[in-house]
Every structure is written in structure tokens, then in C-alpha cells.
Amino acid sequence: MCGICGYIRKREVTPEQLKKMNDTMYHRGPDDSGQEIYGMRGGYQVGFAQRRLSIMDLSALGHQPMHSPDGRVSVVCNGEIYNFKELREELADYPFRSNCDTEVIIAAYLKWGASCVNRFNGMFAIALFDREEEAVYLIRDRIGKKPLYYWYEREELVFASELKPIMACPDFHAVIDRGVLSRYLFQQYINAPESVYENVYKLPPGAILKFCGGKISTWHYWSVREAYGEASKQPVNSYEEAKGQLKALLQRAVSLRMIADVPIGIFLSGGYDSSLVAAMAQAYAGDPVKTFSIGFHEDSYNEAPYARAVADYLGTAHTELVIDEADMLRMVDSIPKYYDEPFADPSQIPTMLVCKLAREQVTVALSGDGGDEFYCGYNIYEKVAQAQKLDMLGGMVHGLCGMPGLKRLRLEERLPFKVRVIAGNREREMKTQFGAGNYPGMARAMVGDMPPGETALPVHYPVESSYPVSDWQICRMLLDMDTYLPGDILCKMDRASMKYSLEARCPILDPDVMDYSYRIPHAYKYAAKDKKHILKEIAYDYIPREMLERPKKGFSVPLDKWLRGPLKERLLCYADRELLKRQNLFDEPYVSKMVESYLETGDRGRGTGKNYSRLIWAFFVFQQWYTCFCENGNE
């Protein structure tokens, strides 16, 4: 686990400048660092750098950049190849010097070429320089656990695990991509391949980029669409078989992620996913595993008692920290430094706190991420199923309200909100992305009209016809796997954990588990309206049903209270008309009036229809980021 960065450029980057780029990610790898510069045909220089958090083979033999014995290949890697021991057996003719998984990447590439990535079970972002081919490859894991940015301009490329090294690269001119702003304000994150800057991109999950002779090409070696499309053609027709095989695959995934030369723990919320991971880890380890949870003084979203009960039942060595509002509020200022791109999912704050707690005792922590997206766990999936049943009726209402004689009466506006949503849901590419009220329009209005020649991304993802499925519920799950999971959930955990030099591992996102989940009939996941049915049934094999059956609470942050209280003055500064004019990113009259109205509404109380804390928070976080990196520079 670490951070990587580098470049392929004709313009000079000195060793000192490369080190400066690398050291912006000190938190990702405090144990070791390495920077090297190589020559390349065509007048290019290749720079590779890495910050190391030692997990496997803690000796100096794990130092990166790492090279093949003949000097043909150099590599830097962020992440872990969990099946590296199995691969070493297949690569027995390679003269291994270390017990590090990174060396397996080199050996595998020399034997199988870039297609070696298909054999890797892990989470990774890899940069590999092949001197024989005179090419540099960037490779990202299947579901996007590990981040990888790149800046491509004038036939030169700079890459990094975070944006900070790119910002620190000589000649980088930070131009904000205004086209992503309305989508960011609505979604609260920026999904691959876009980034906040022009000409800077995220390599999509499951993708390979090749740089050769100044040109780049990219392709997918794995994608949600293709993996689901192929696997769903071979469904498992027996529920007992599906449950047994899924359980075995999860057990193997957990056991692989328990391999490390440093202490390992588990994030435990007391919900199904984290409890199942903890139970399997405890069964594998034998001795008590360390589990960690955050508690809140506010009972309405405090899950700590449930986590404690599960820990007691499993016999783990449990640590619980009860936090208050002040603890969370103190984390707000660290958001831009460690997320280094606007990211406004407020659950990042308690996530950082639980990572801080775990890092006091362990260097690796397992999480239950991925269970909701792959096994139908979110409440929105129930609403999507209902909406599909009512779609035909909604179309009839929409058509009736649009008839010439009735249209001028504006009947659709008089309908109850839920009826209006179903009737207005006519976009084929966005059928499962409904119910946001006037938030999409407000997000667009906050940015205003685009300059001539520029186009704003739609706030929703207009891609649903690309998924090979007619069931809306499955379609929305696949969409979330492509967008919300890597762009929000996994990004949140990566930055929160790496802030404290903690490696987070996700057994449910094991490649074999993911691929097998696509073979499991949807009726086994959403059975008689029971979300995550098959995953729950596996959990009950370890933990009594009554300990787990409860409404999901999740991490909660009192945004309204903060924005109208301790953060109010800063919000007003961020909405200052002179600042907005100087930025030239937002529609100054609209945003100023919107913030003013929001704060006035808070003074008068709730329930007036202007409680837009989600959009206001996204705006606040953007302005906080802008102040940190665009006004004050990359500190």
C-alpha cells in the first residue's frame, strides 16, 4: 500500500522536483520512498516515484521502483496482489529476490505481457515501463479500489495516486473544468474519467492505458457491463448451491486479505456486511481479531451498541470510540488536504475518525464495502422496483397532462409529488435516477450557462441503455457499481484510511466474489422484498438473526446545524459576490441569493421548502477546496 507518481516528458523534471511531487503523498507511505529517472526513445524522460507503506516483506527488498533482473522492466505499484503466492508457483522460473507481491507483477508481465492483469486478484494502481517495447503502462484494478490520475497534454503524461503530485509538477496549469461542476454539486463526487481539472483524468476502473511515442491508448480488461453480461448467461439455478459457493468464495476472500506482515483489524458497524466479514475473519484467525467502531451520543444514528453486541458474540478484541459533534466538526478543515479534489459525501468525516481509531493498533483493516451495490441493499432499489411497476401508468398520466387542451392548465404541477415523479420519468437513459425534485435544476442553475464551445455534463448518468438488462433494479445496481461505488464509497475509504497510513481491504469486492455474484439470480438477492437476502442468510450461519435484524442507520452528520451554525460565517464568505465574480465558475446572483435564502430559512425554522443542505454542503466543500489549492496553492 502506498502512493505512486511519475511522468513521461520531454520537458525537464529534476530529481528534486520529482521528490517534491512524491512527498506530497507522505501520508500514503511514511515507511520508505524512492524516485528514479530513466531515458526513453524520442527524447523522453521517464520518472517513477513511490511512497511506501510496508505491508508485505518489510525489508529493503520491497523498495520501489522495482526492476527485473535484466533491467527490461521497472514498476511502481499502489495496492496489494492478494494471490501473489499462488502466482509465484506458476512463475517458479523467475529469480525472485523478495517476498513482496510487487515483484510478482514484474515476473507475470515478462511471462504474459499486459494481459497478466487478468490473473491478479487484488486492489492496485500500477505503472510499468517496458524498455524493450519503449512503452509505459498504467493499470487500475477492476472495481477502482485504488485511484490513478493522469494529466495528458502536448504528447506528455504525468500520473499519480492523488492530484497533489500533478499539481506540484512543473508547468502544470490548473484550469478548472467547469463542465463537471453541476454534476459534482448534485452527485457530491466526480466520477471517472473526469476530474476537476481540464486535461486531467482518472483512469477508469478495470482499464489499461498505454503511452508509446507520445500517443496514448486505453482499453478495458474488465468492466461491470461485460462481466455481468457474460456471467448472467450462466445463472446458478439452485439457491443452496449459490449460497454455499458464495460463502466459500467469501471465506477465501477474507483469508487472502488476512495475509500481511503487520497487524490486521476489522471495521465493525454491527450491520450485515461488516459483521459477516468480522465473523469470517475471526473464524479464520482463531485468536481474537481486533475490531473497531465509532459511537455517537445521538441515539438516532448510534450503531455502536449493535457493533459491541456482535463483537461480544464473536469474541473479538473490540475497541469503541464515542465521538460528539465537536470531534466531527474538527475534521472539516482536513477534507481538502486529504481528498485533494472536491468530495462532499459527509460520511467521510466519521470514516476518517474510525480510521484514526484503527490505526492506533493496526496497519490493515477489512471493511464490508460493496455489499449494498452487489446484493441489493440500498433503499433506492425498493423505490426503483416500485417505479418500474408504475411506469406504464406514469406514461399515461404524462401523456394526458400533455394533451393540447389540458397542457395549459398545468395539471402535472398539481399532482402529488410521488405521482409527478413517476409521470415525469420519461428519459430512457435515466429511468432509475428519479426522485430528486428540483435539485438537478438547482445544481445546473448554480453553475449557470456555459461559455461558448463548452458543454456541461448532465447531472445524472445518461447510460442506462448500455446495461444488458430490462429489470430496473438490476440496472440501478450496475449503474451504482460503475459510478457511486468507485467514485464515492471507495474514494471515501481510500482517502480516509490513507490519511492515517492505514490500508483498507474489501473482501466482498474480491474479483471472484464479484464475478460469481453476477451468476446469482436476482431473486436470491431481493427475495420477497428482503434486500441482500442471500448475504443475510450467510451471515445468520455465524451470528443469530435477532442480533442483525434492524434498520440500517449509517454514519450521519448534522449538516444543517453546522452550515447554519458554526460554519455559517465561512459559508457567507464563500458566497461573497466578489469572490464568485473573481472565480467565474458559479452564477453569482443565483448562488448568493440561494445561500442567503437558505440561511434565512434556517433562522425562521425548517419546513419552508428551502432546506437544501446537500447542495449547500457540496458548494461549501468546493469553495473550501478552491481556497486551499487555487487561492493558497498546493500546501
Image (tube, rainbow, N blue to C red):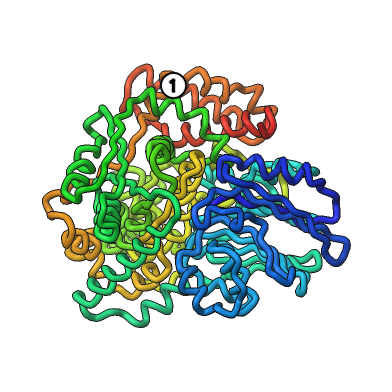
Q: Position of residue 635 (x, y in %)?
A: 66, 31
Residue 43 percent location from the top left of the image = 88, 61
Give left or right: position of 243 versus 188: left
Visible in this render: residue 307? yes
Foreground residue among 6 and 602: 6
As drawn, 191 above or below 622 = below
In the rendered image, residue 107, in percent from the top left (x then y), is placed at 61, 73
Left or right of residue 498: residue 107: right
Q: What residue sits 39% from the left and 71% below the top?
A: 512
The front one of 340 and 603 is 340
Asked if one can make out residue 191 in the rendered structure from this viewpoint, the answer is: no
Which of the pair 192/209 is nearer the observer?
Answer: 209
Query: Residue 153: image x %, image y %?
Result: 77, 54
- As helix, strand or loop, the secondary structure at mark 1 comes to helix
Give the quarter of the image for residue 19: top right
- Whether 126 is drawn above or below 410: the answer is below
Q: Which residue is mark 1?
A: 599
Q: Residue at x 29, y 50 (%)?
A: 289
Residue 291 relative to residue 565: left or right: left
Residue in front for this viewpoint, 631 or 290: 290
Q: Residue furthest right?
A: 43
Residue at 31% across / 42% down in the picture?
A: 292
Q: Residues within 10 Å of mark 1 (few under 14, many from 20)?
A: many
Q: How many marks?
A: 1
Give the amino acid type for the residue marked by disc 1 in the picture. Leu
Residue in view at x 63 percent, y 28 percent: 580
